[in-house]
Every structure is written in C-alpha cells, then in structure tokens.
Amino acid sequence: MNTLYLAAVCAVVPGLGRSKIHQLMQKFGSAKALFEASEEALLATGICEPKSVVQFIRKRNFDLPNKLDTFCKLQGVQLISIYDDAYPKSLREIHDPPLVLYVHGQLPNAPYCAGVVGSRDATHYGLKAANYFASGLAQEGIPIISGGAKGIDTAAHEAVLKAGGITVAVLGCGLDINYPAGNQRLFERIAERGAVISEYPPGTAPMAINFPARNRIIVGLSRAIVVAEAARKSGALITAHIAADEGREVYCVPGNIFDGSSVGCHDLIRQGAKLVDSVADILEDKAAWQIAMQNKIFQPSIFARVEEKATTSFEAKPLPATELGKKIIALLQQGPLSLEEITEQSGEAVPIISMELLELQLAGYIDVDRAQRYFRL
C-alpha cells in the first residue's frame, strides 16, 4: 500500500468518493494503480458515477504524490493511512473514518482519550470549566483531544500543556494553514508533546463544511466527550451528537441559566447526556469502561438513538422545482445519506449539493439526524 498515492486520491476534489475508494483499490490492486487509472478503466468498474470520474480525471495531477511527499518531509509531517498499524484503533471504529491522516507530532498510544469541546465565543465561566476538566484529566494521564479553535478548544489545549499532559488538535484545514490566526505557536507547542492532525491535504482552506467532518475525528480519537460550554447553535453540539451515535460517553458542564451561553449543554443533558461537575465523575466511568473492556461487555450509548423515519410512506407532496432537488429526493428514498454519499451519488460538487440541501431543508422536504445524515420527510 502506497500511502502517498492513497492521500493523492483523497486529495482530488470532488474525487471518487471516500466510501468507494476501498472498492476501487480492490479492483485495481493498489492506490497507485487507482490514482493512475484511465477514465475508461474507472468507468468500466461501474463503482463511480460518470460525472465523478470525469471530475477526478480533470483535476488529477500526476505530480501530486511527489508534492505531498515533499511537503511531509520538509514539514516533519507523518502520513498515516487507515491500513497502517499506527492508525488509531478507536478512530477505525467510527462509521466514516478518514482514510489518511496528516500528523505533525506523535499521536498518543493510549486506550482512553477524552475530548473537550465547546463554543468559540466562550464566557469566562466556560473557559474556566474547560481549563478545569482538561487540566484535571491530563494530570491523570488522559490525553485530551480538541479542535484547535478559539475559545473552549484553545483553553483546553493550553490547560493540558500547562499541566504537562498530552493533547491533540484536529484541524479543519491543511496543516500548512494558520487557522485560527494567532494559534500557530500553540500548535507548535502541541506538536512537541502530542500532535496536530488533519485529514485534509496541504493548501486546504478552513471552509465551514470541513468542521462537522473534523468533529467526527475528535469523537473517533476519544472515548468520552466533555462539552464545557455550548449555546444552542454551537458546533460542539454536532460533536456531542456524533459521539452519542458512536457509543461514546457525553458529559456536559451545567452553566448560567440567564445568559444563554450553556443552553446547548442543558438541552443535551435533557436528552440523556451526563451532567458533570467534577473530574472524579469521569474517572469513575473510565474505571468502569476499563473493566467492561477487559470483560468484553459493551454498553449502548447514553443517548437513545434517533429513530430513522420510514422511507416507504411519504405524504403526497409536489417534488422540488429544481432537477438536482428531485435527484436528491430520489436518492434519499433508499434511506439516509451523508453529505459525502449524496455528493458521490449525484456527481455534483460539494458546494452545489450543500446549497441544495439547505434549500430542501428550509422547504421541509428533508432533515438531518445526529449522525449528520440527511433523510426525507
């Protein structure tokens, strides 16, 4: 397996689709053969939509593997594929694990890590809560995973470093992009004791669509997620719901009932997340988790999973006005799909699909579940 060629396949946007790459590699025998395959050979597999193949061929640059290799060597970045022994075991367990990871530093070799997440626009209370839990868990030898963003993420990373612990920042852009501005020195310090990682190739801008995908990696690296502070529309809620669907424990810090900064946390607690006000609460559950793992006893998520709506008994409703909208509705008749799956099967670019999905949501045709899969109403 040539990881550079697999990374090159993943880097070609919109690409052949992450969920189909393994099938394609089996057909062609290697990532190198897949990357270099002709348009005719790719179409002959019948695995990908013709439009996706055409776009892949058009955007493919045969020098890309060499460019990625040069970047990794110059920047001290390790490229890890899902087929490598160094790939984190817990990350392999999630529904949609990244096929490659760009790693600056060293990923922790620990069976139990905890994610600490929350609002970018954090209050003093939220920052204090993030500091308390991140520092306390780090002092117990638990690596802390977060997203490198402003607010709660930065507070968590800083607290771990101050405590002498190990932390990992998962970015929603290429490792060569300084985002958020001002955190470059923080990322350098993180890499000295832990790692800064991304599934995105160098040069990838921090687009909004990247961050929900980034959140699943935070979940995958963690056995528990602590939401230090979150308003109702905080991106941390996406992380919490993904964690619940992946069977991870979700803890929420209660907050001020008057300013709205913790409404999201309170909503999660009502839905079944565990209210936490001390590090000891998490350590007790960690001990129980270790016993369960030793005895191979697996507990369901603390959230009740959202029941997917039936796809066979839709109310009569006029189809969307656009051809793409009609196509998406037809795809969703077979069951819920992620953004990437819809993009792959429709053959359209991600920005176009994202806008159409938003229009369909606003018009009441579709909705999205906790795992960020779209389903027809």
Image (cartoon, helix red, strand yellow):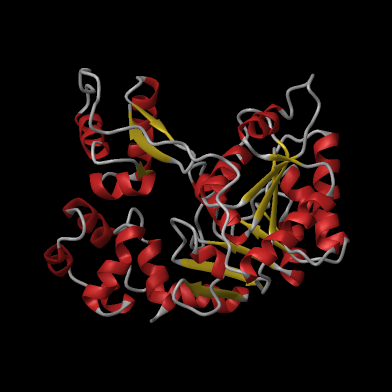
The spot of residue 59 in percent (x, y) is 30, 59
The spot of residue 100 in percent (x, y) is 47, 68
Quarter occupied by the C terminus:
top left
Residue nearer the viewer, 138 or 62: 138
Residue 342 falls in image quadrant: top left
Q: With respect to residue 286, does 3 lie above or below?
A: below
Residue 308 falls in image quadrant: top left
The residue shown at (32%, 72%) is 62
Q: With respect to residue 270, does 13 lie above or below?
A: below
The spot of residue 32 in percent (x, y) is 31, 78
Residue nearer the viewer, 254 or 161: 254
Residue nearer the viewer, 346 or 290: 290
Residue 287 falls in image quadrant: bottom right
**In the drawing, does residue 20 fall left or right of residue 256?**
left
Residue nearer the viewer, 120 or 240: 240
The residue shown at (53%, 73%) is 87
Quarter occupied by the N terminus:
bottom left
Residue 36 visible at all: no
Residue 59 visible at all: yes
